[in-house]
Amino acid sequence: MSMLKGKRVGICATRRAEDIAEYIAQHGGIPVLEDLVRIEYLPEEEVNRSLENALLLKPSYFLFTTGEGAKRVFQIARKREDFKEIKDLMLKGRIFARGYKTRKVLLEENFKDFQTVDHTRDFISFLEPIEGRCVFVQMYGEEMPELEKYILKGGGVLLKVWVYRYIPDEEKIDAFIDRFLKDHYHAVVFTSAFQVKNLFQRAKERELNRKLAQKMTNNVLILAVGRTTAKALFEEGVLRVLFPQKERLILALKELEKAFGNG
């Protein structure tokens, strides 16, 4: 019998929320989607400006970070008269897809010679040489400071291609805090530091941040899918955070199962 059976698990995810919910439900748990942030798409003209910059800077590396973002980049690019020039530019560089959904979009766009990575950190290991090179990165709602620092320190140029941004939803954050403090959850999953920071910022405004952190530490299992998200939770005073040694969603969820099994 799965250790998740009958457990109510809050899912604070800006991406792959449905995958997490499906896994929990298949293992007998009760997934509860918590949309603490909403996606706001940028106007097409902003994406077009980034594509024009790409034609000028001629990137050596292209990183697509989400399926949704990659799809929108190509939808907008296809409307341009110079779409073939943009695609040829990509084919001359090295193309990377983060995650299987992004990989699927690139295959649909008839790209074959590209590398799939699971995490931004994996992408960094391929950036050689970097000095004097431009790196095209389809952003996914929040900044990527580790990647940006690496590129700039190495003498490279970072071209951020914003397609959408994450906007905190104060009403939903308040509702989540209230439910959480009333023992609604057995566990909560966080997939990004952005969610954690905005959750605790609102909790501070309501003078509930210490109470929230204490309850997360003592009463509810808290799972971070990656180290960056775990670090954000630790910085907010949460002393007990589960996270996998390798940043893989399936490994993170298995950590949660194991924790329930250990009582």
Image (cartoon, grey):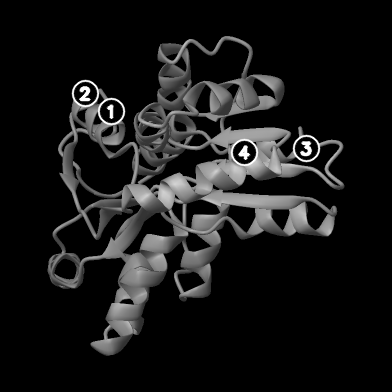
Amino acid under disc 4: Leu
Asked if disc 3 and disc 1 are in contact, CB closer than 8 Å, the reply is no
Between circles 2 and 4, the one closer to the viewer is 4
Disc sitting over residue 249 in the figure: none
Going from the N terminus, do you reach mark 3 or mark 2 first? Answer: 2
Amino acid under disc 1: Tyr
Going from the N terminus, do you reach mark 4 or mark 1 first? Answer: 1
Q: Which residue is mark 2?
A: 26
Q: Which residue is mark 1?
A: 23
Asked if disc 3 and disc 2 are in contact, CB closer than 8 Å, the reply is no
Going from the N terminus, do you reach mark 2 or mark 4 first? Answer: 2
Give the quadrant of the N terminus: top left
Which element carries disc 2, helix, strand or loop? helix
- Residue at x 72%, y 41% (from the top left corner): 124
Category of crowding for the residue at label 2, using alpha-carbon neighbours closer than 10 angstroms: few (below 14), some (14–19), many (at least 20): few
- Toward the front, the furthest residue is 81
Disc sitting over residue 55 in the figure: 4
Q: Is residue 54 left or right of residue 24?
A: right
Going from the N terminus, do you reach mark 3 or mark 1 first? Answer: 1
- Residue at x 69%, y 44% (from the top left corner): 57
Amino acid under disc 3: Leu
Q: Which residue is mark 3?
A: 127
Q: Nearer the viewer, residue 233 or 141?
A: 141
Amino acid under disc 2: Gln
Category of crowding for the residue at label 1, using alpha-carbon neighbours closer than 10 angstroms: few (below 14), some (14–19), many (at least 20): some
Going from the N terminus, do you reach mark 3 or mark 4 first? Answer: 4
